[in-house]
Image (cartoon, rainbow, N blue to C red):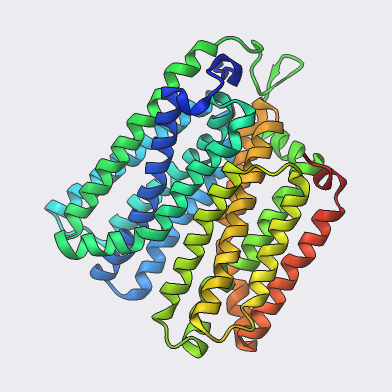
Amino acid sequence: MTTEPTARSLPREPLGDPHLRRLIVGQGLAAVVDALFLIWLTLFVLELSEPGIAGFVLVAAALPRAALLLPAGVLVDRLGPARVAASASWLRVAVLLALGALVTFTSPSVTTVALLAGLLGAADAAYFPAALALLPAVVPAEKLPRVNALVQGAESGGDLVGPAVAAGVIAAVGFDATLGGIAAMSALAAVALSAPIRVVRRGEGAGDDAGPDAIDGEQLSSARALGAGLTYAWHDPLVRGMLAAIALINIAVVGPVLVGGAVLADQRLGGAGSLGIVLSGFGAGSLAGSLMAGWRPPARRGWTVVGGVAAIGAGTAGLAAVTHVIAATAVVSLIGLGSAFLGVVVVATLQERVPKQLLGRVMSLVVLATLALDPFSYVVAGVMLPYGTTTLFLTCGSAVLACAGLVAASPAIRSLR
């Protein structure tokens, strides 16, 4: 059974350790690849078929990721996050190369593209919790906020410039060459993410011989191991409160900002083209929030979590009153800043406090609350839009503000330092 070494076995200054530098570069590159490939996939499917089919392909990629996240968390805890992250990264490379060969030498059907996109979604299900669980194995606890900020900052930067870069490169060199470049970046990320395996081998065999899924010497089945992770998350008030807040924020914000923002741009901000400017404000705010959380970690984390949730709620509600693209961009920037700052603080806190043998399962729940609930958020936006964007933003913003009040009422979170 694989176990991970403690952070104390590595140098005290994390950015001076070459393995950690490779890890940050690898995770940053992986985030940029995700942003570029999403745009490539959408534009390529639009080139192949009707606009509605693009949604089908994106769903084909999202469903395996959502369905496999929780089992992947068990896999991470059993095999070790380093091995799972590296294996998932190389699976991504293989799928991208296969897709690139099909695009270059054949005319692939939409079904084939959807199947390969689904395989990438399965790789993502394993990669995301493994990447989050890997950091505490190689980073001293006091440096986790800074390293999480660097990784999340790379992701925010990819979201900020990825669409424009991907669209521009596709226009210049075509779909096949662009996909080749994305695959090459993915291979570089996989090489970088393979380096930590050599580090964690030092700690193999150092843990309990029964392994991380054992109770009284009995090895748990996968189902019972998953149940143990869910039970821990439910009974720990800090974990339960943070997961609930993340889930509510994503349901109440993602769909309203994207779907409602498009309607708002068309009705009040001078046309649908202004939506790109507004969403770029979200990316800029996210990047700023990530860097702020890493370089100035809060002394009172509990109240910082409360403030981050409140900022997101206030920004969402504030969209109900904006009538100019500059004001809308500023408000959405506040939402992005609060989301990114909150994300760094929450993830670093869970990485520090969740037992190592359960970390993969808890991180899979974090990813589930962050990514897999997006379709529900789109449904919320679609149901409420007939009542107008003002009602949509005020209702969703108020729900998040109420969540901030509930978080403030939680002793486990309020007293967090």
Find the residue positioned furthest to the left.
105
In the drawing, does residue 409 fall left or right of residue 37? right
Task: Please state which of residues 321 and 391 is positioned toward the viewer in this rendering.
Answer: 321
Q: Residue at x 34, y 55 (%)?
A: 36
Q: Relative to 1, is 282 above or below?
A: below
Q: Residue at x 54, y 77 (%)?
A: 328
Q: Residue 291 appears at what percent x and percent y? A: 53, 48
Q: Can residue 351 be seen?
A: yes
Q: Residue at x 83, y 58 (%)?
A: 406
In the drawing, does residue 142 fall left or right of residue 146? right
Q: Can residue 129 be seen?
A: no
Q: Residue 31 appears at what percent x and percent y? A: 42, 47
Q: Relative to 198, is 282 above or below?
A: below
Task: Please state which of residues 189 and 286 is positioned toward the viewer in this rendering.
Answer: 286
Name the quadrant of the N terminus.
top right
Q: Relative to 195, is 246 above or below?
A: below
Q: Residue 221 appears at what percent x and percent y? A: 64, 28
